[in-house]
Amino acid sequence: MAIEDFFRHSCNIFRRVLSESDPGYGLPVSGKTASYPAEPSLSGVQCFFSTSGNGSEVPMEAEGRNTFSGANELALPSGTDISQGDKVVDVRFDLSYTAGFPEDIRGQYISVPLYRRTAEEAL
């Protein structure tokens, strides 16, 4: 069995674009904001989604509302262009994740932790 047979799922990868945020009203530029293009940078990438041992989503109570935060892991073919902060969309379920720091595993494949939040958290 070849490593290519392991990648039985498909995903789209959106590259993170950093831009200066101008609040207007003569205020100084406050920093960079992240956004994603409407079209994926890489479409139909062969991959494999796996969940952590304790489940992919963990419900948490936060100020009277439920939020779900979870982590998965993504395996991609070696040489796939992905960076920390990129958006990864699982084509099967149309779920969006944010990529963590990718790690090359012995030149065979790339392992990427994925994070997903279904609600914004207050700072």
Image (cartoon, helix red, strand yellow):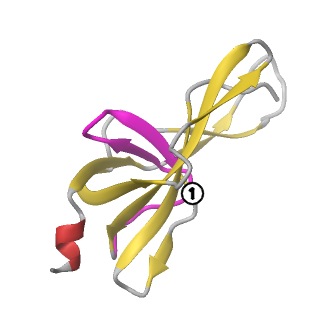
> Chief secondary structure of the magenta span?
loop
Q: Position of residue 80 (x, y in %)?
A: 34, 68
Residue 96 lies in the magenta-colored region: yes
Determine the secondary structure under disc 1: loop
Q: The residue under label 1 is which amino acid type?
A: Gly
Residue nearest the viewer, comparing 90 with 18: 90
Q: Is residue 79 above or below residue 23?
A: below
| Residue 44 visible (yes or no) | no
Give the residue at the far top of this rendering. 64
Q: Which residues are magenta?
A: 79-98
Residue nearest the viewer, comparing 53 with 89: 53
Left/right placement of residue 9 relative to residue 14 reads left
Q: Is residue 115 above or below residue 35?
A: below
* Pointer 1 residue: 100
| Residue 77 visible (yes or no) | yes
Residue at image coords 24%, 64%: 7
Quadrant of residue 111 in the image?
bottom left
Q: Position of residue 86 (x, y in %)?
A: 49, 50
The total of numbered circles placed on residues is 1
Residue 18 lies in the magenta-colored region: no
Q: Position of residue 34 (x, y in %)?
A: 59, 40
Residue at image coords 37%, 64%: 75
Q: Position of residue 114 (x, y in %)?
A: 51, 51
Left/right placement of residue 12 relative to residue 19 reads left
Q: Residues within 10 Å of mark 1 (few under 14, many from 20)?
A: many
Residue at image coords 29%, 59%: 47
Q: Is residue 107 above or below residue 37?
A: below
Give the residue at the far front of this rendering. 54
